[in-house]
Image: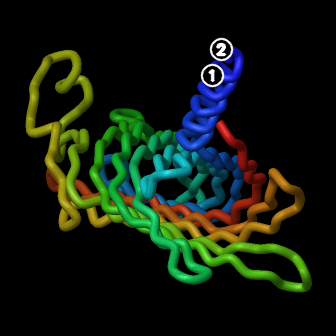
Amino acid sequence: MMTSKHSLLATIIAALLWSASAMAQTSWQLGIGGTRVLDTYLSQEHFSGMGMTFLSTTERKKADRSWATLIEHEVNIADVKDRSESCQELQGEYSLYVGSLRSWQVGHFLLQAGAMGCANLGFIYNTSNGNNPAQGRLSLHAMPSGAATYGFRLFRQQLSARYEVQLPLLGLMFSPNYGQSYYEIFSQGNYDHNIVPTTFVSAPNIRQQLSVDWKISHFARLRIGYLGNYQQSSVNNLKSHVYTHRLMIGIVRELKD
């Protein structure tokens, strides 16, 4: 009798653990494409060239919940030149996106909406500048986020198309003031409005992804898509933008935690 009770208890616990378990979807993508850079602290010129991006995305959702947790790591590097190709800049950055999205199933569409936070750390290095050759990039943003996924079949293959967008609303960013050197900031300690609150007016950024997944096994899909990240700001009498366009390809795995 005790064995039967223990067996029943074990079954109930196992069922509860199963219902509380989470579905995890992880993707790794690599992309290449064009980059445009302007930073008036370093130069009044526009720079353009090619760059590469690595993007890692993890989405977790419990079976009995409508909310999913989304974590994205984005690493971007680029080598750009001015119009005369006489001046070169190197640009690189790392961005961490963390947020929660609520899901609604509407026919073949999975709609998601929520909020994300973004921490961005990067640099722009001008190889021709003697004084102040580099510009640091550090920012934090809170952003509404939305996504739509559509599942369909084509030529007997299972596919899904997804569009995802983030629009920074409020944030903070580091910026030297016009004519201020990094030596003044860090060696002499001369603060001059270097931590700047930002809004969608002073930093009207947008990040969007469009992708198509092709199911190649029970646990894996091939993903091909586009990633566009358009960062811009106008603070402390300085203007800056980094526009990236990437053709992405990678693998998506679905696992049960």
The label number, if any, that marks residue 61 in the structure image: none
Dot 1: few (<14), some (14–19), or many (≥20) neighbours within 10 Å?
Answer: few
Q: In the rendered image, which quarter contains the C terminus?
A: top right
Q: Is residue 109 above or below residue 29?
A: below
Q: What residue type is labelled 1?
A: Lys
Could you say whether the residue bearing mark 2 is in a helix, strand or loop? helix
Instruction: Identify the residue at image location x=84%, y=84%.
Output: 154
- Count of numbered tags: 2
- Its colouring scheme is rainbow
Along the line of sight, the residue nearer the viewer: 133 or 103: 103
Residue 242 visible in the picture? yes
- Image marks 1 and 2: residues in contact by CB distance under 8 Å: yes
- Percent of width and height locating residue 56: 62, 45
Along the line of sight, the residue nearer the viewer: 184 or 17: 17
- Percent of width and height locating residue 130: 40, 34
Residue 230 visible in the picture? no
Instruction: Identify the residue at image location x=16%, y=38%.
Output: 195
- Percent of width and height locating residue 208: 49, 67
Dot 2: few (<14), some (14–19), or many (≥20) neighbours within 10 Å?
Answer: few
User: Disc 1 designates what residue?
Assistant: 5
Q: Is residue 197 above or below residue 8?
A: below
Please give left or right for residue 60 compared with residue 116 in the image.
right
Instruction: Identify the residue at image location x=19%, y=67%.
Output: 201
User: Disc 2 designates what residue?
Assistant: 2
